[in-house]
Image: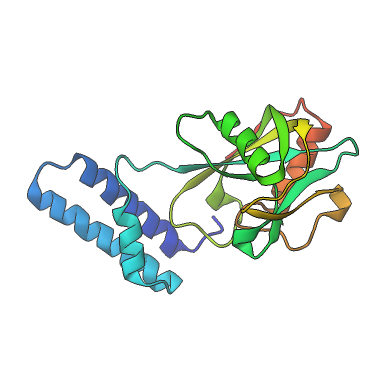
């Protein structure tokens, strides 16, 4: 675990409270789960220096059985084996591979292809699930308040042309020895980039997981 222990505990308490509030029948137990949710918010606020009311509002928007959120990222390579990357507007224009949260009514691979199209202007065919990773185990910074599972796909360009979007300010291809230094570590890590190159070089590699 690369995350602070207070975050791990707060996240787990929040998940217990959210799931409990989903199924609770007894009004006294409901009050106890709400107290647990408030405790989790206070722990997270204390550790992160974020206003507790903002965190309580964030937790209050969650309902149903607590499960990890799902994110997709895509490794796309050109004929020179260079990796497609974008500057992410929301993270001070740092570099990452295309991707984002999954959408309802779309499969994970459909979401992956959609993200590439929206962020880069390229049409891709998804060819492989390269990695299925728990975000908290990979050293991403800053940490997320909720658990996140990250799916990394490989995709082949079938059309389109480089185009920026409201989410991206630049689109480019980079060789493995020329990856930008200012990467968006909340979205991708150097190790994950290395693994994308490895899966591209050897498509027979099994999917990385955990």
The one of 163 and 151 positioned closer to us in this rendering: 163
Quadrant position of residue 123: top right
Q: Is residue 61 above or below residue 35?
A: above
Quarter of the image containing the C terminus?
A: top right
Q: Is residue 89 visible?
A: yes
Q: Position of residue 114 (x, y in %)?
A: 61, 36
Quadrant position of residue 14: bottom left
Q: Position of residue 113 (x, y in %)?
A: 64, 33
Horizontal side, residue 149 vs residue 183: left or right? left
Q: Position of residue 136 (x, y in %)?
A: 53, 52
Q: Is residue 8 above or below residue 18?
A: below
Identify the residue at image location x=86%, y=54%: 178
Total marks shown come to 0
Quarter of the image containing the N terminus?
A: bottom right
Q: Is residue 114 above or below residue 26?
A: above
The one of 55 and 140 positioned closer to us in this rendering: 55
Q: Is residue 13 visible?
A: no
The one of 146 and 174 positioned closer to us in this rendering: 174
Horizontal side, residue 145 vs residue 112: left or right? left
Give the farthest residue toward the right: 80
Identify the residue at image location x=71%, y=44%: 120
Quadrant position of residue 45: bottom left
The one of 85 and 179 positioned closer to us in this rendering: 85
Q: How is the image coloured?
A: rainbow
Q: Position of residue 22 (x, y in %)?
A: 23, 42
């Amino acid at each position: 675990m690369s995350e602070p222990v207070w975050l791990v505990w707060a996240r787990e308490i929040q998940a217990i409270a959210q799931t409990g509030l989903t199924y609770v029948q007894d009004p006294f137990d409901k009050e106890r789960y709400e107290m647990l949710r408030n405790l989790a918010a206070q722990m997270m606020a204390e550790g992160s220096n974020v206003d507790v009311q903002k965190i309580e509002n964030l937790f209050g928007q969650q309902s149903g059985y607590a499960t990890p959120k799902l994110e997709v990222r895509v490794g796309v390579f050109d004929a020179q084996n260079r990796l497609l990357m974008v500057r992410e507007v929301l993270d001070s224009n740092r570099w990452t591979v295309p991707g984002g949260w999954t959408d309802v009514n779309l499969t994970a691979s459909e979401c992956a292809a959609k993200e590439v199209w929206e962020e880069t202007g390229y049409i891709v065919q998804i060819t492989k699930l390269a990695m299925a990773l728990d975000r908290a185990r990979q050293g991403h910074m800053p940490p997320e308040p909720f658990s996140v599972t990250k799916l990394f796909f490989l995709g082949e360009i079938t059309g389109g042309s480089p185009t920026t979007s409201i989410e991206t300010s630049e689109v480019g291809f980079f060789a493995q020895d020329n990856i930008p230094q200012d990467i968006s570590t909340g979205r991708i890590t150097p190790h994950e980039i290395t693994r994308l190159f490895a899966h591209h070089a050897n498509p027979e590699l099994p999917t990385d997981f955990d």
